[in-house]
Each structure stands twice: as structure tokens, then as C-alpha cells.
Image (tube, coloured by chain):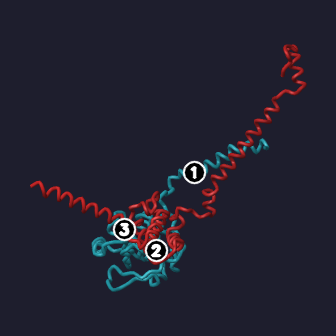
Amino acid sequence: MNPRLRMIIPAAVFMVMAGLLYFGLNPDRQLNFVPSALVNRPLPVFTLPDLFDAQGTISSNELTGSIFLVNVWGTWCPPCHQEHPYLVEISAREPQYTWIGVNYKDDLEDARDFLDERGNPFARTIVDIDGSLGIDFGVTAAPETFIVDSSGTIRYRHVGPINNEIWAQTFKPILAQLQ
Amino acid sequence: MMKPVPFLHLLLLWLVASACSAAIDEHEFSSREDERRYNQFINEIRCPQCQNASIAGSDAPIADDLRQEVYDQMQEGRSDDEIMAFLKERYGDFISYRPPLNASTFLLWFGPAILLLLGFFVVRRLLAGMSTTDTAKSLSAEEVRKLETMIGGSEDGKQ
């Protein structure tokens, strides 16, 4: 082998190792993050009960038409309690965004009481009593939040509670881009 | 006085035991074949929440929901491929323990073979290097004669 080429080998090995370590040891890497198969795919098709209207239903095609956010939550889920005041605050401060709640595998009485007592950030709340809509959304655990654009395409999936910082740094730029 | 206590214990044990078996046999199957198919299938689905477990071995609520979904779809007569496609549509290739072959999984599939080939190549180079150094270092006939005269042509003249 050309001795010049041979000299490159240790450097090349170093570069490859450095690259792999940079990727593997990156503190921002979320090991539990499951890449969503639904981003850039249409909203799942559903017709499900309305939490506040026993006879009424909410269907996917009546929601489509403008940008909205879908928040999957349940009263049984501690991080949802943590997130809730931020949702109330954000929806009051920035009413241009529509929030649709998905009450996920919950006791409906508890869910209504929760929203009555602590404020309701949602324009409408869909009841997903058995978690089937959750499966259609590829939800792994509540809370999760999705951004849906005006064509009814899911643009972003956020796993875990939202707070002001996450809202400002992650959601706002995506929403601004969609408008 | 003594009699009711053991009886109560037995009753409690029986209650506990029946509750446990109810938790394990969560589904009913019309045949052994179906049951085996179901168990095999849920062992190949990764739990999206606790990622080191299959949905068969996970207690996470989502694993429970997915088992139910798989069971329901099997009862409806859908094939394994159809159910897998359904799950991949929602949770991505991630959900399957059998990764597909594509650009991002290329290293996963061929990495070991590439490393083996590389190792083979390096070892061959090293061995070739060794034998060339050997010939380079062995003495030519001329050098042997010189050496022998230096030593003084003594003894039997063996090289």
C-alpha cells in the first residue's frame, strides 16, 4: 500500500470514532424518543363522542380547514396535571391557536370536573375512552401534542408536557412557518 | 376457635390465585394454533414506551392496548402482515424487532460483515508484510560467504 495512504488510516479511524461518539454521547439525544410515523401524514379519520355533549360527536373532517393543536391528556396522568396550567395560560394569551383535547382513557366525570375546576384550554374535547384514537395517532403515553396544518396534515409531534419555554422555542417557530 | 382461620386462609389463597390467572389469560382463543400465533406475534412487537421490552413482556398501558389491538385484528381475520403494516403506519419501523433494509439501517445489516472483511484484509496485509520483511532480512549467498570469512571459515560452514 502507498505509505502516504497508510498514514491516513489512523486519522480516518479517529474521525470515524469521533463522529460516532459525537452522535452517541450527545446530551441532547433523547433515547426514549420514538420517531413518529405520522409526521407529514394526514390526520387519522375518526368520529368520536364530545366530552361536553353526550349526544354529539366530533369527526376529523369537521376539524380540518385551519391550523390546530391536538393535546392528548388524562386526569390519571401526573405530567398532564403539570402541563395543564401552561395550556390554560397559552390558550388565553394566544387565542389565534385552536386547541383540541383528546381525553385519553379517562373517567369522563373526572375529566369534566378537572376542566371545570382548572380551566378549559380546549375548543372541543374528543373522548377516546379505549385508546383507539391514541393508537391511530401513534401515542405512546400522555401527554402528547400534535400540530395539524390547514390541509389536515400532522406537522409535528411533541412527547411529554409543554411549558412556556417549549412553547416558545419549539411550537411557535413551527406555527409561524405554517402561517 | 381454630377451625375458621385455616379455612379463611384457604379462601383468600384461592381468591388471590384466581385473580392472578385471570391477569395472565387475558384473551381466549378458539384454537391452540391461534394462541401460538398471537403469542409469537406480540413477542415481535416492541413496546413504544418501555423500549427494552416487547409488548408481550411489558406492563405499560400502551402495551396492553396494542395487545388488545393485535388480538382484535386477529379475531377479525387479518393476516400478520396486515397487522404489522397497521402498526408500522402508526409507530414506524421502530415497532418491529425486524428492521427493514434501507439507508439508515445499512450499517446495522452489513456493519458486521464489513468489519469482518476489513479485519480479513488487515490480517492479510500484516501477514504479507511479515513475509516480505523476512526475505529482506535473510542473507544473500554473497553475504553468507562474507560472513563466513569474517567468522574465519570455521567449523562446518553451516548457514
Disc 3 crowd, CA 10 A, few/some/many (<14, 14-19, 20+)? few
Q: Amino acid at mark 2?
A: Met
Please give the residue where the numbered disc 3 appears in the rendered image.
B26
* Element marked by disc 2: helix
Question: Is residue A150 or residue B71 the one in the foreground?
Answer: B71
User: Dividing the picture into quarters, in which one does residue B2 lie?
Assistant: bottom left
Would you say residue A141 is visible in this rendering? no
Q: Amino acid at mark 1?
A: Tyr
Q: Is the N terminus of chain B in the top left, top right, bottom left or bottom right quadrant?
A: bottom left
The chain letter of the cyan chain reads A
Q: Is the C terminus of chain B in the top left, top right, bottom left or bottom right quadrant?
A: top right
Q: State the separation of the CA atoms marked 3 and 1.
A: 45 Å
**Whether residue B64 is situated above or below residue B7 in the rendered picture:** below
Mark in the foreground, 1 or 2: 2
Please give the residue where the numbered disc 2 appears in the rendered image.
B74
Q: Position of residue B3 (x, y in %)?
A: 12, 56
Q: Position of residue A53 (x, y in %)?
A: 32, 83
Q: Colour of chain B?
A: red
For the residues labelled 3 and 1, say whether their Cβ atoms are less than 8 Å apart.
no
**Whether residue A163 is situated above or below residue A112 in the rendered picture:** above
